[in-house]
Image (tube, grey):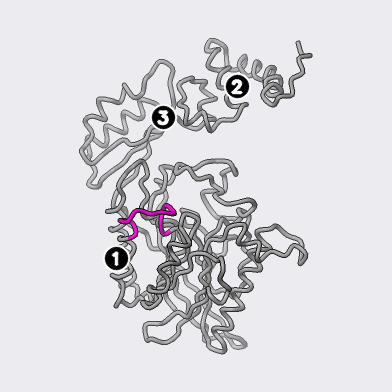
Amino acid sequence: MKFIHTADWHLGNRMYEIDRNDEARAFLAWLKEQIIANGAEALVIAGDIYDKINPPNEAKKIFHNFLASIQGTCCKNVFVTGGNHDSGDLLDSEKQILSSLNIHVVGQISNITPEDMVFEVTGSDGKAAGICAAVPYASENELRNYFDQATEAGTFSDLAYGTLYSKVLEAAKNLRGNRELPIIATGHLYAADLEGRRKTLNQNDKLDDGIRSLDVVGNLGTVSASVFPDEFNYVALGHIHYSTTVGGNKNITYSGSPFVMGFDETNIQRYVNLVDIQLDKNSPSKIEFNTAVTKIPVPESICFRRIFGNCATARAELVKFIQNPPQKETYIEINYLPESGIDIHYQLEDLIENLPKNVSVVSWKVKTSEDVLKYGMPDVGMAELKTFDEEEIFKLRVRAKNPDLSEQEIDSKIERLLPLFMEIANGNFNGDEE
């Protein structure tokens, strides 16, 4: 069985009010080419088809036109599961008519059984090539139907998801019967022990698309690889926007989003996963399958770029765009380090006015709160201030109001006064201190 795994399309997304419909069409045209070129018999879309619960009509049109375009190709099956950005009701409202085209939709797990989530995968020869357990995003309330704390110790997420995937696997095995067919599963969740970029983020860190790094309910951000039974030959996951594996297991994989969803993602290569599962004919004792996963890079149709640094650095980078105009539409965020006495907007105005017509500065951001606190600059916007806690704001104000003090003197003042300030901020001050 050969198929392509993708996720997190977020059709209808308008990051910084940029119309991304042409970008979506370009990706889907390319995806169709990859399906045909690689002989993919199925397409698995692991959630977040749309960016909003009520997507624009144009986004729905783009999706439906794509589904229609791959009819008659080698792709004999499409599996669509809902994500946390999707309306499960909207997706499920189309499942009956789409199923006649071998497009299987599971928008939500409410009011369905594990048997309703398993489907045969048809091969290019018209025969069954595998079984797909299409599991969508599940809210905490939905997962409670699979949670029995009396069974064993463990976190809510691991116990609930463990039960869910065990039941789905059982249904998939019943559908398979005695046939030598691989079983794959999907999921839209935040798993633990991911490889790569997000390992350094704290739970409360925010991404540029406004979504916290743990965009989940309650304790659902700690799903371990152990909830997926080993009998799944591949688990196609969505929700994380970059390509990664869970616990280092190449068969439990996030494909990542094919699109940039925030300027913090501009340096991340985009992929879809080509998965080829073949029967191991050399296995002497039992049925075994070999799973090969190939990451196919997604080409950029429009470009997002982030400029870091102070005013001088930003000027130098903008000059490069003027001297060497890009071929593609390009959107820029200036992520700058504030400098005393310098209005960076004014200093860059002349260069921005002379940028090529296909280059636009769409976002300005002060560098991280840690940088602002370090340099003690007062020109922080309200959007940034809202992300600071009381301690950060106190440090910022001390530095801003004492520009003539040395770094050592400022640190000493903060060390002496911060405990008192935090008592006042937390409502524990009784007035007895000097």
The residue carrying mark 2 is: 394
Please tell me which of labels 1 and 2 falls first in the chain.
1
Mark 3, secondary structure of its residue: strand
Residue 42 visible in image:
no
Seen at 33% across and 36% down, the residue is: 362
Q: CA distance from mark 1 to mark 2?
A: 54 Å
Q: Which one is closest to the eye, mark 1 or mark 3?
A: 1
The residue carrying mark 1 is: 65
The residue carrying mark 3 is: 336
Q: CA distance from mark 1 to mark 3?
A: 41 Å
The residue type indicated by label 2 comes to Phe
Seen at 57% across and 11% down, the residue is: 405
Horizontal arrangement in the rendering, residue 321 relative to residue 157 (left or right): left
The residues colored magenta run 49-60
* Image x and y of residue 75, in percent: 35, 75
Seen at 62% across and 68% down, the residue is: 164
Q: Residues within 10 Å of mark 3 (few under 14, many from 20)?
A: many
Q: Nearer the viewer, residue 208 or 59?
A: 59
The image quarter containing residue 191 is: bottom right
Please tell me which of labels 3 and 2 falls first in the chain.
3
* Image x and y of residue 424, in percent: 69, 21
* Image x and y of residue 280, in percent: 52, 83
Mark 1, secondary structure of its residue: helix
The residue type indicated by label 1 comes to Asn
The residue type indicated by label 3 comes to Tyr
Q: The C terminus appears in which quarter of the rendering?
A: top right
Q: Which one is closest to the eye, mark 1 or mark 2?
A: 1
* Image x and y of residue 168, in percent: 59, 73
